Amino acid sequence: MIRIGQPEIAALTRVIESGDLFRYNASKVTETEHFEQEWAEKLDVQHVLAVTSGTAALICACAALGIGPGDEVIVPGYTFIATAIAPLMCGAIPVLADVDSSLLLDAADVERRITSRTKAIIPVHMQGMPCDMDAIMAVARRHNLVVIEDACQADAGSYHGRRLGSIGDMGAFSFNYYKLITCGEGGAVATNNYELFARARMMHDGGSVFWPTKDKADFPLFMGMEFRFNNLLAAILRVQLTQVDEWINAGRAGKRRIYEALRAAGVRVVPAHDLDGDCGVVVGWQFDTEDDTLRCRDLLKQQGVGAWRPFDTDRHVYCNWRPILEHQAWHCDAMNPFLHPANQGAQMDYRPDMLPTTLGILKRTLFLNLSPFLTEDKEQDIIRKIIAAAQQVMIAGV
């Protein structure tokens, strides 16, 4: 969706010609550090750490918060598998919870799944749609839990005026090829807590003790992994940061027009927690039955409109997470959190049919991808075709 062109090429050329590719340089602020500062300003947070992927960001956040064996972390059943991978990589157990009709984490179901082992909640702003963060944060406060916002699909989106990823204790972002801003692959962690930032920084770099940040290591050191960013990727993202709000505002305005037109025509649109903060990536609508959903999808396909069901995006639906369902979290049993003594008795009885509410919603929902570059004629054509197909299905079902 996002355009990459001459400005990014010029930024890459500048960095290549400088010869300064490594993220650390004791004598000056590097490109990566400039990006971290600019992303922090965009989010209105104190600290940002650039890492190699959204998965790495989630892992670093879990490690920073001290999540480990004996802990449970509640995640939605509709998200990329990385959301569940992150706590497992730190030795904890992901607990799968339902989404509601908004296709986002259901705060009420989260509360039902809390036990004495629960340490964290990871709400996911799927498809650029903001979660109900008021409800999620209220649950977290009642039970003294930490919140990691997975904003990997919602870079620069917002919720009631606050940027997504800045509301919980920590936020995680992705900049891979399919995201709102992209450098091919990358990610970031955000927080207002310096200790959490310092611990995330240790986790992201096994050699952190040797680099210029060592003088800021005010907390006990631990051995990290290797998720270091580089200045080439940062150069691309710095250019895209100057455009992302323009892209989001255009996509958001288009989504609102389509959303309101569908709703006015009696089409049941996917509920939104904050249309003003939505990233404008998709517009969604729903039916009473799976058959009606498939019929509408097929009618639109015949007219050249590529609507799709979230149920059919296998990597985003928990029932397809085979390594997790089968408790194969690591390459050897000795490191497998599912076999760790501290995790025995945790909620890990996973089954493909364990979240029927989530599966039903995913099967009865259609999405259409949006673009900030849609023309007015194309937008009106899409509206007409969706309304006609949906009404045809609804009339046939009466």
Image (cartoon, helix red, strand yellow):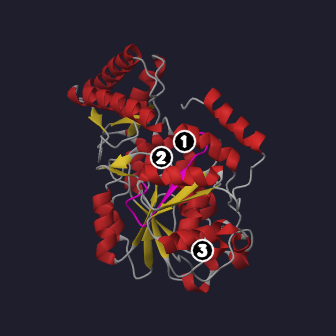
The amino acid pointed to by label 2 is Asp
Q: Nearer the viewer, mark 3 or mark 2?
A: 3
In the picture as drawn, the residue positioned furthest to the top comes out as: 377
Image spot of residue 51 (x, y percent):
62, 57
Residue 216 image label:
3
Disc 1 packing (10 Å; few <14; some 14–19; many ≥20): many
Q: Compute the Cα span from label 1 to label 2.
A: 7 Å
> Which residue: 38% across, 40% down?
364
Q: Nearer the viewer, mark 3 or mark 1?
A: 3
Q: Quadrant of the C terminus?
A: top left
Residue 155 image label:
2
Q: Nearer the viewer, residue 329 or 183?
A: 183
In the picture as drawn, the residue positioned furthest to the bottom comes out as: 341
Q: Which residue is mark 1?
A: 179
Q: Is residue 15 above or below residue 368?
A: below
Q: Compute the Cα span from label 3 to label 2.
A: 28 Å
- SS category of the residue bearing label 3: helix
> Which residue: 65% across, 53% down?
30
User: Upstream in the sequence, badge 3 or badge 1?
Assistant: 1
Residues at circles 1 and 2 in contact by the CB criterion of under 8 Å: yes
Q: Is residue 377 above or below residue 193?
A: above
Q: Compute the Cα span from label 3 to label 1.
A: 32 Å
- SS category of the residue bearing label 1: loop
Span colored in magenta: 165-183
The amino acid pointed to by label 3 is Lys
Residue 246 occupies which quadrant of the picture?
top left
User: Upstream in the sequence, badge 1 or badge 2?
Assistant: 2
User: Upstream in the sequence, badge 3 or badge 2?
Assistant: 2
